[in-house]
Amino acid sequence: MLRRAVLGNGLKVLVQEEHTAPLASVWCWYKVGSKDERAGQTGVSHWVEHMNFKGTTNIPRDQVKGIIEQFGGSWNGYTWIDQTTYLETATKDALDRMLFIESERMANCLYDPDDCESERSVIISELHGGENDPDQFLDQELVATAFKAHPYRHPTIGWLSDLQTMTRDDLYGYYRRYYIPNNATLVIVGDVNADDALRRAEQHFGKIPAGETPPRQQTVEPEQTGERRVTIRRPGTTGYLKVAYHAPGVTNSGFDALLLLDAVLSGAYGMNLWSSFRTPAPQRSARLYRRLVQQGLASAVNGSLLPTEQPFVYIISVTATDGTPLAAVESALLEELNAVAAQGITPAELAKAKAQLKARLVFDNDSVTNIAHQLGYFETVASVDVFRDLMPRLAAVTLDQVAESARSVFSASNRTVGWFDPLPIA
Amino acid sequence: MSPGLAPARSVLPNGLVLLAKRTRATPSVTINVAIRAGSVCDPVDATGAIHLLSKVIDRGTTTRSADNIAEALDSRGISLSVTASRHLLSLICTCLADDFVDVIALLADIIQRPILPPAEVATRKGEVITSLRQDEDNPGVRSTEALMELLYPAPHPYGRRSKGTIAIVEELNRHELAALHAARFAPCETSVVVVGDVDPDEAKSAVALVFGGWSARNPPSVPVSSPPVPARRRRLVIPMMNKAQADIAYGFTTLTRSDPAYYACWLMNHAFGQYSMSGRLGDSIRERQGMAYYVYSALDANVMEGPLSIHAGVSEANIDQAVASIDEEVDKLVTNGLTQKELDDSRRFLIFAMPRALETNAGIANYLQTAEFFGLGLDFDVRIPELLNAVTLDEANAVAKKFLSVDRATIVIAGPYDQ
């Protein structure tokens, strides 16, 4: 059973007992991501995340290493467009330690100037590593083209020039603005007693003062009025095609229908950003797989619709087989999308998509870490109730709703097409 | 002492091994089937044949078409992963517990009666060739493959690209794959692991029903020799001037999984390149010098002497400094050894991390399959603390001294660098 509380300083706390293994997972979520960044400071959310592993007032830099490992624990964090999060999963006797680490991270990070400089080059290395992958590079360019006003357009890692010029004060100012209890959700899942866990959360976080409500970005992406294209011609060996359509946010009623439509087109991944994409989607009977992969035009096709706070994009990614022109792949892909927009899907396809998602949502929640992720993720981008109601909502989606989703989303004027068209390597 | 996982192990009359473990965390079951038919079984002139077989084996049987199989999997939300490692060809999936009986029957059919349709072989060949072309443009893959080729020179199978080459894959045909299947797949070479919300007796009945009638000749073993120990330092540069940064792969051959010194080597490697943020290597190259987003070391002790390899992604300007820093850390480790604290920290972590590693059905299944392959015993999870606690600092430092040496390091740099 999920227990919820809000501390006096505004910190939301979610606790769920899971007694399947002697483990506990603690996640602390902040409602800040790359969409909250202003021009000149792109990448600051992610860089701040890195800095928040580098020591606090009460966890000196040289004591960070091993602080959770001594309990056999793992720790990590990630930043995306709507959120930044940190986690520890360890044996249950480390619960106090995990809560201490997260309370320190919220209130007392150091931002030593030398550490900021050292991390600048680490992050630029991360950016370059991403650029080494043409698929990832195309994804970044595609999203930047699909949005012209909304800050979802810039990559979470940031633009290189901003990473080269941001200062320690930029980082620290951002940290202080957003890392406050009334902008966070603490999630505890595992072999714990819920009352005890809530008491401990109060002990560790209760004295951290609330802050001023952080500013929120106001821009609404204007409706796209015509197809956009981006073509990257760089030395490479393989052609990649990506097509993006503006898509509803997770609280919009059209999201569920599009999620089922994605399952029909390319197989259901599930909904867990932390774990789902580690297992390929069941897709051999999916429409795009049969048309593109089974016909030899592509070696891979994947759809990506992720739960986001505001309308983001649904992206279909295709890897062309060696020697297949991207134009042929694009033509076949668009033919399939036009067909589904015109005719909708069959009852058998809808039933299969629902069965796939039902199974994947079970698989998505197979560990305390994954359960805790889902609770915190949804509470941060929407509400944990959106997650808890997901199955009945998906079960209630009708054929007409999926057909309407296909019609409204897959229009040419809502489309951005990206090519990575490889040039011969010298 | 905790009873640990205590899986139920049984052997069918035809030699097939079943390991079953009941868990109740979710209403799902992970099935992990491994056949000792990995890429070491590739014919010398057909490298990549096992890899291609793994891509096409589940595309039709004598009683089910590829479409039928696709429908059977997709309608249950199942993604079947078929992969080939050096020694094993594995079929792994997770299904809802209610689907277990149907799914194990499907896997048994795929393993025993694949028909390898020519059209499917042709399509999968196209995918493999595309994948090989992607690898050609990937500095991480290029550096690692070149390192393995140098550490394990031909004809050693560990040095071969398991996917083969484009020229070889283009020539492979259905008959070669079918012959390979007939020669290498047999019940005595197969172990089935079932973990999840299914009673072990029911699992055994279901497995016996669908695998019990399988008979095949015992395949001859594949001889694999020990790799040569490099006599000198080697350095290979693979210029990839279209890339934003370089990948460094730096390594040594070490020991077999059955070597009594394995546990000392495991701990040594963990402290060196894994503990917390990548051990000593991470402290130096990422944390102190800010040169790389990732740097780590990996130990892959196997049937034969596997590699210990160090990997880092660095900008062109930092390549020489990164290699020098790795040299420095290797030299310090060999000369001065680990501290008692470093050894104890890694030991404690590995012991206390067991519940996490064994939390999910997939994690347990993978662990049991590994334990079965290396003959570690049904109580291996219970014995791990004792095995790790027995390692002394002298033993950990001795394996570092024995296997690591700046003067015998093999180094590959792939990226925007041509010096």
Image (cartoon, rainbow, N blue to C red):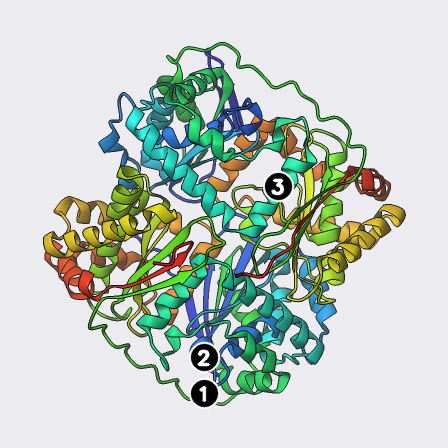
Q: Nearer the viewer, residue A92 or A69?
A: A69
Position above or below: B131 against B317: below
Kind of residue sitting beneath label 2 = Glu
Residue B398 placement: quadrant: bottom left
Mark 2 lies on residue? B189
Q: Is residue B350 visible?
A: no
Mark 1 residue type: Pro
The residues tagged by marks 2 and 3 sit, at their Cα atoms, a distance apart of 48 Å
Location of mark 3 (residue): A141
Does residue B262 appear in this view? yes
In the rendering, at what x and y percent does residue B368 appear?
40, 63
The residue carrying pointer 1 sits among few (fewer than 14), some (14 to 19) or many (20 or more) residues within 10 Å by Cα, namely: some
Give the alpha-carbon distance from disc 1 to disc 2, as whole Å. 8 Å
| Disc 1 target residue | B219
Give the chain letter at badge 2.
B
Query: Which quarter of the rendered picture does the C terminus of chain B lie within?
Result: bottom left
Crowd around label 3: few <14 · some 14–19 · many ≥20 (10 Å)? some
Q: Position of residue A33 (x, y in %)?
A: 53, 28
Residue A350 relative to residue B250: left or right: right
Q: Are marks 1 and 2 in contact (CB under 8 Å)?
A: yes
